[in-house]
């Protein structure tokens, strides 16, 4: 039973007894074909293909680290539409990185 439960997990960060969050992403046309082939997350479902070639994709996660590293890898080609708390988390990390980068450049 434990092996079956472990195999059903989406990533090492996911948990079967945690609340699931629905994440809605916009994938820019430039990387859309890659994201169709190389999924951002095991639960990825393409909800809509836009006329410009972009995609709306949703995933189900239980922990932010199931998806944030993949989103960061594909920046600026992926935008978090929902949930707002996850978008805010990413934006906060990027702002912190920018500030630290500027400090290092002037030292």
Image (cartoon, helix red, strand yellow):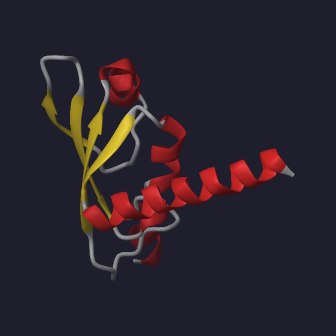
Q: Is residue 72 left or right of residue 29?
A: right
Quarter of the view holding residue 54 = top left
In the rendered image, the vertical position of residue 53 relative to residue 61, given as above or below: above
Q: Nearer the viewer, residue 91 or 59?
A: 91
| Image location (x, y in percent) of residue 78 | 37, 38
Residue 32, horizontal then vertical, whole percent: 33, 24
Quadrant in the picture for residue 7: bottom left
Rendered view: 40 above or below 6: above
Residue at (41%, 24%) from the top-left corner? 34
Which quadrant: the N terminus? bottom left
Q: Is residue 6 left or right of residue 79?
A: right
Q: Residue at x 35, y 70 (%)?
A: 62
- Foreground pick, 101 / 107: 107
- Image quadrant in which you'd find residue 105: top right
Counting labels gives 0
Residue extending farthest right: 107
């Amino acid at each position: 039973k434990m092996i079956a439960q472990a195999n059903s997990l989406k990533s090492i960060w996911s948990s079967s007894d945690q609340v699931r969050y629905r994440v809605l992403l916009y994938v820019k046309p430039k990387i859309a074909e890659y994201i169709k082939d190389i999924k951002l997350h095991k639960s990825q479902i393409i909800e809509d293909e836009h006329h410009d070639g972009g995609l709306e994709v949703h995933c189900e996660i239980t922990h932010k680290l199931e998806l944030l590293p993949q989103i960061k890898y594909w920046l600026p080609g992926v935008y978090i539409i929902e949930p707002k708390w996850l978008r805010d988390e990413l934006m906060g990390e990027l702002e912190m990185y920018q500030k630290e980068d500027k400090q290092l450049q002037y030292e």
